[in-house]
Image (cartoon, coloured by chain):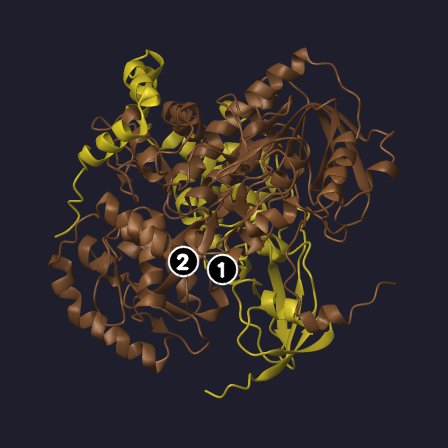
Chain colours: A brown, B yellow
């Protein structure tokens, strides 16, 4: 149900629809893109970045909200912390229970190691579960891994780490087969051929999907398999620090969120698969991310000596929900645009070709709303532009939305909006951490015995990820991390467990005059009202 | 609409709180002062982590929904179900046959379904749960997989089932059996994977990896783009 003012705007949109359906808008030139991004993308706004005073990337600029976590103290006092009693003694510790963590633990187990998976919320609570649109792989006759490569680096601003992109596109078909063999119900033709569509920035239709529950379908299969393979899982137990022995990772300290106890894990190798940072709400943007996306892994790896890359930017997904208020920030899948839905301003006009890369689309929407005042405002003060979803059924036939976008359709139906008849109001939402900890093609970080996979690592996507490459990256690098960590664990002896790296990091903080009250990782966001928090007492 | 938000009473585990009208149950609980550990996952209706049961004052009817997707209403008495102890069979998918016998062997309680339809009524995804259970009972794995596809495994069906069946675990088994054994295989993906391991793209990829930024830029701009062809 839309507000009356919005209905008038929808009327204008409907009037221009037949004209718009014939209208061709060409792709922007490199110069036009550069101009649009530098003027309107949030990453380029003054005050977004800050120079780090401590750690492996000292002197480099990163997003303020990330700097706040890096320039903070450990939740524990390393000089008064008893780690003499080991609670779990394993070959491979996997931290994180999303797509990358589950893939890593399955692969480590396959390679005959003793695996422990620890995760902050439940197994499967992750951004993987929420990914709707699809997973890329160059497996059609008119496509090739080199074409996929070119799309990845073009989308990433030609800054991506070549070895990582090579690994991503090379392993992609194999990853799809692995998932198919696990039982993932991909959308297929009757002869088994994958139904694939375009995503923003793709030169070939290589987006594979499972209706619009692609990530959910993948995650549910992975979770079921982790349970079948008897992998020990500890839920509601995030890692709050890594353990080290002369710079090598030897395990981690977990924190049981329900009993407030800590748990000591000794591991021959450790895989970080802790996901992204959406719940930090960079520049107060809403987010499409799950509840636990607070960059914990990034923080503890940085303290242990792992440098980060491309943490000077964030991916805003161009089409987050801007209305109704209850679902602000949630994702409206890019698949809608892939299926032909157009972006339309308050006057009923298009303003950008819909399948530019996400950074360009976001900048164009922000320009339209904030700088040109052609957005549609809601009574709660949000604004956005229309995503003309009824076009999907007009182009592809009646009930396409219900068949191909059941999750989206249901989401809006819950709030009395029929997206096959009415457009959706959208505005960019904080979506993805393009950068992360530095890894190589074996998923090794710069800290010996520590691996990284999934959103926590950086380099694959450069400064902007394309749709469908994050699910792919989770599977490809999850499996690479699982395999390599298992092989290494078989050669390794256990190391000593110390918190020396924290002692050293705290000294650096002190030398840089950083306030001791700030602590990280933050583990969970806090959405209580400040009035409530002000009246809390600690008994 | 006036600027003043209308405040409504809700009862969280029996305790009264005044919250602004229009919030989801999840946001209303946070407004009331709760900070979630359990009972909150994706906040977007995908993870099944926030199953909630509620009832209105003076109404016998027990209702349910996802806390992140359901609006808190006046005089709602609610509680979230943080965890449901569900029976999950362990199996090696490679060794299973996609047949009804497999389902009954792993989940014999499936035969206890009395077709009461409580599962369908309780499903926050509006899935015809009973229909897929009946399909499963008949060994029609294809249909069970198709009907249950949107299941988010929140556990509300299992919590209400008088026959103590865990519908969603049977559903994921059906979907995996279908995806692995019944759905036709994508041969073109296997062909491509074989080409890759045979080294067909090695030279081209190596060239790209070693190319400088300007060369890549030029190649990127000049690459041809597969036409949409979905525009009528």
Q: Tell me where residue A404 appears, x and y as whole percent.
A: 32, 50
The image quarter containing residue A114 is top right
Residue A445 relative to residue A385: left or right: right
Q: Which residue matches tag 2? A: A428
Distance of label 1 from label 2 (alpha carbons): 8 Å
Q: Which residue matches tag 1? A: A285
The image quarter containing residue B91 is top right
Classify A168 as above or below A241.
above
Dot 1 surroundings within 10 Å: few (below 14), some, or many (20 or more)?
some
The chain identifier of the residue carrying mark 1 reads A
Q: Tell me where residue A478 appears, x and y as whole percent.
A: 52, 29
Classify A12 as above or below A212.
below
The reply to whether discs 1 and 2 touch (Cβ–Cβ < 8 Å) is yes
Dot 2 surroundings within 10 Å: few (below 14), some, or many (20 or more)?
many
The chain identifier of the residue carrying mark 2 reads A
How many numbered marks have been drawn onto this rendered protein structure?
2
Q: Tell me where residue A519 appears, x and y as whole percent.
A: 72, 49
Looking at the rendered image, the quarter that the C terminus of chain A falls into is bottom right
Residue at image coords 65%, 42%: B87
């Amino acid at each position: 149900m839309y507000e009356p003012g919005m209905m008038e705007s929808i009327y204008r949109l409907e009037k221009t629809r037949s004209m718009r359906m014939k209208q061709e808008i060409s792709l922007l030139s490199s110069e036009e893109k550069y101009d649009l991004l530098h003027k309107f993308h949030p990453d380029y706004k003054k005050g977004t970045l800050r120079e780090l005073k401590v750690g492996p990337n000292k002197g480099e600029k990163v997003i303020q909200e990330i700097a706040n976590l890096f320039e903070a103290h450990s939740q524990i006092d390393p000089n008064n912390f008893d780690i003499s009693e080991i609670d779990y003694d394993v070959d491979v510790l996997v931290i994180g229970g999303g797509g990358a963590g589950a893939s890593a633990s399955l692969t480590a187990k396959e390679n005959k190691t003793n695996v422990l998976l620890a995760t902050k919320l439940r197994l499967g609570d992750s951004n993987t579960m929420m990914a709707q649109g699809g997973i890329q792989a160059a497996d059609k006759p008119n496509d090739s891994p080199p074409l996929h490569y070119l799309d990845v680096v073009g989308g990433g601003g030609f800054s991506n780490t070549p070895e990582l992109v090579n690994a991503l596109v090379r392993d992609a078909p194999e990853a799809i087969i692995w998932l198919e063999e696990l039982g993932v119900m991909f959308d297929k033709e009757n002869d088994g051929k994958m139904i694939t569509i375009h995503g923003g920035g793709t030169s070939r239709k290589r987006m594979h999907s499972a209706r619009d529950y692609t990530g959910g379908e993948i995650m549910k299969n992975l979770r079921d398999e982790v349970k079948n393979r008897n992998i020990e899982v500890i839920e509601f137990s995030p890692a709050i620090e890594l353990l080290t022995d002369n710079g090598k990772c030897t395990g981690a300290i977990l924190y049981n969120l329900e009993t407030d106890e800590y748990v000591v894990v000794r591991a021959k190798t450790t895989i970080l698969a802790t996901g992204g940072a959406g719940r930090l709400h960079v520049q107060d943007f809403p987010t499409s991310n799950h509840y636990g996306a607070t960059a914990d892994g990034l923080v503890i790896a940085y303290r242990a000596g792992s440098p980060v890359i491309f943490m000077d930017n964030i991916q805003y997904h161009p089409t987050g929900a801007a209305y109704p208020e209850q679902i602000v920030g949630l994702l409206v899948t890019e698949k809608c645009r892939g299926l032909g839905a157009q972006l339309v301003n308050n006057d009923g006009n298009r303003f950008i070709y819909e399948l530019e890369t996400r950074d360009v689309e976001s900048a164009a929407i922000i320009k339209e709303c904030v700088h040109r005042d052609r957005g549609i405002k809601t009574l709660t003060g949000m604004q956005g532009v229309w995503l003309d979803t009824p076009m999907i059924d007009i182009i592809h036939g009646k009930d396409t939305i219900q068949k191909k976008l059941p999750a989206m359709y249901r989401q809006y139906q819950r709030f009395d909006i029929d997206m096959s008849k009415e457009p959706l109001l959208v505005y960019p939402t904080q979506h993805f951490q393009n950068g992360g900890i530095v890894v190589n093609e074996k998923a090794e970080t710069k800290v010996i015995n520590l691996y990284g996979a999934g959103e926590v690592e950086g380099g694959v996507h450069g400064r902007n990820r394309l749709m469908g490459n994050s699910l792919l990256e989770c599977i490809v690098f999850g499996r690479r991390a699982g395999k390599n960590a298992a092989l290494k664990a078989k050669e390794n002896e256990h190391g000593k467990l110390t918190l020396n790296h924290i002692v050293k990091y705290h000294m650096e903080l002190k030398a840089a005059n950083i306030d001791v009250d700030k602590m990280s990782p933050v583990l969970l966001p806090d959405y209580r009202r400040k009035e409530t928090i002000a009246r809390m007492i600690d008994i | 609409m006036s600027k003043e938000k209308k405040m409504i009473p809700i009862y969280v585990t029996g305790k009264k709180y005044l919250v602004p009208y229009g919030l989801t149950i999840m946001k209303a609980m946070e407004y009331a002062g709760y900070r979630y550990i359990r009972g909150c996952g994706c906040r977007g209706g995908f993870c099944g982590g926030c199953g909630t049961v509620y009832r209105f004052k003076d109404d016998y009817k027990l209702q349910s929904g996802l806390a992140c997707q359901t609006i808190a209403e006046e005089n709602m008495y609610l509680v979230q179900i943080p965890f449901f102890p569900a029976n999950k069979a362990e199996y090696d998918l490679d060794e299973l046959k996609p047949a009804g016998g497999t389902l009954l062997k792993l989940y014999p309680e499936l035969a206890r379904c009395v077709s009461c339809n409580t599962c369908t009524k309780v499903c926050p995804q509006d899935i015809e749960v009973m229909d897929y259970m009946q399909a499963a009972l008949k060994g029609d794995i294809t249909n069970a997989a198709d009907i249950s596809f949107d299941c988010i495994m929140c556990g509300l069906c299992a919590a209400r089932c008088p026959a103590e069946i865990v519908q969603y675990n049977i559903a994921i088994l059906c979907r995996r059996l279908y995806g692995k054994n019944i759905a036709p295989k994508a041969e073109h993906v296997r062909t491509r994977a074989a080409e890759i391991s045979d080294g067909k793209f090695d030279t081209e990829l190596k060239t790209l990896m070693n190319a400088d930024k300007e060369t890549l830029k030029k190649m990127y701009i000049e690459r041809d783009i597969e036409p949409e062809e979905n525009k009528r």
